[in-house]
Image: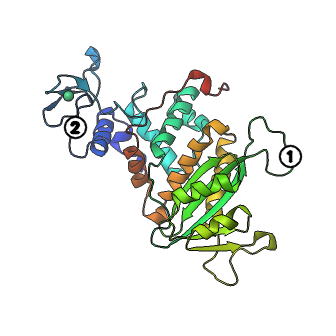
């Protein structure tokens, strides 16, 4: 027996049972009127085209399934295939390419591409609580990847896409975002919204953080240009955690995804943030991570125009 032998990866009824248990922990909720209690299950009947997981509400008399209102809604793929894809994306440290999903799941490349982006939406965190609550250390750093549309290639990082990321050292969680530039007027409001005033900010000596640093209880800096990675004055001052995160992100983007446009980069970041924040050191094994992703499928329906998808097979 392997993890992949679990019934919900093969049997459609078991897949529905699995998803229903996570999304409706207290029993089915009518998609139309929100009522619980007087809901009956309709037995699936492929000959009469009665779908798996179909329910009927005794109050509003309408029918629904657990797929409604989730990332699964506008898809014809069986739910057990979705669960396989979610497991693969949750358990692979650097991600899974749409090509790999296409071959492994035996679905079209286009389906694989859409499915992967929807799963990234499910992974996207809605959490707004500021990092560094209680005075903890929050590491902040930026990295550069890909290419800013319409920008001339220069030697510096000017023409590249800019990513800003924050790690809460106490909780081990990361939050990252695409930013248009690294000017203080762009960065300061992001840090103010995402980091508690009582936190100790940890950055390199980049000019942009100097003034912002005064807004927090403390600000430790390391001087990378001088080859300093941990402060010789205070060993709790370092940015190694956030650099470790960027290294996973970059290896994944270069090795697996190869290219992401500015339009989609935030979705890849959501995927890497999700896996990092729910890594084994934070108490999540592959199965727990997949269940957490499943909890995120509600209310994140995405509709893509066909023109959004890549043209290569
Ligand atoms: Zn109802």
Question: Ligand 1 is in which quadrant of the figure?
Answer: top left
**Residue nearest the observer in this picture, 121 or 204:** 204
**Residue nearest the observer in this picture, 185 or 56:** 185
Circle 2 residue: 28
**Residue nearest the observer in this picture, 164 or 291:** 164
The x and y percentages for residue 103 are 57, 33
Q: Where, quadrant-wise, is the C terminus in this rendering? A: top right
Q: Tell me the distance, in whole angstroms, between the alpha carbons under discs 1 and 2.
A: 56 Å
Residue 248 in view, yes or no: no
The x and y percentages for residue 170 are 49, 70
The x and y percentages for residue 169 are 53, 69
Q: Is mark 1 within 8 Å of ligand 1?
A: no
Residue 85 in view, yes or no: yes
From this view, report whether residue 62 is shown above or below residue 226: above
Q: Residue at x 14, y 27 (%)?
A: 59
Q: Residue at x 17, y 37 (%)?
A: 36
- Judged from this view, the residue extending furthest toward the top is 48
Circle 1 residue: 154
């Amino acid at each position: 027996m392997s993890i992949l032998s679990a019934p919900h990866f093969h049997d459609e009824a078991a897949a529905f049972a699995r998803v229903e248990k996570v999304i409706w922990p207290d029993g089915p909720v009518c998609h139309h009127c929100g009522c619980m209690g007087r809901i009956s299950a309709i037995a699936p009947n492929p000959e009469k085209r009665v779908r798996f997981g179909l329910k009927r509400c005794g109050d509003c008399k309408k029918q629904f399934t657990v797929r409604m209102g989730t990332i699964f809604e506008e898809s014809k793929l069986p739910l057990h295939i979705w669960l396989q894809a979610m497991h693969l994306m949750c358990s692979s440290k650097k991600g899974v390419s749409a090509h790999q999903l296409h071959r492994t799941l035996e679905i079209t490349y286009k389906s694989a591409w859409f499915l992967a982006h929807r799963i990234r939406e499910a992974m996207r965190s809605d959490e707004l609580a500021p990092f560094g609550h209680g005075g903890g250390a929050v590491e902040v750093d930026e990295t550069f990847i890909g290419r800013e549309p319409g920008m001339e290639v220069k030697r510096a990082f000017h023409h590249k896409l800019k990513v800003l990321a924050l790690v809460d050292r106490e909780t081990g969680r990361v939050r990252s975002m695409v930013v248009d530039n690294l000017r203080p007027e762009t960065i300061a409001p992001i840090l103010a919204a995402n980091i508690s005033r009582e936190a100790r900010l940890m950055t390199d000596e980049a000019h942009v953080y100097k003034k912002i640093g005064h807004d927090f209880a403390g600000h430790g800096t390391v001087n990378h240009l001088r080859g300093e990675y941990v402060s010789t004055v205070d060993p709790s001052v370092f940015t190694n955690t956030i650099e470790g995160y960027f290294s996973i992100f970059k290896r994944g983007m270069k090795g697996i995804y190869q290219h992401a446009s500015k339009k989609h980069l935030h979705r890849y970041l959501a995927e890497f943030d999700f896996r990092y924040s729910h890594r084994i050191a934070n108490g999540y094994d592959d199965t727990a991570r997949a269940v957490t992703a499943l909890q995120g499928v509600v209310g994140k329906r995405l509709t893509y125009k066909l023109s959004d998808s890549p043209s290569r097979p």
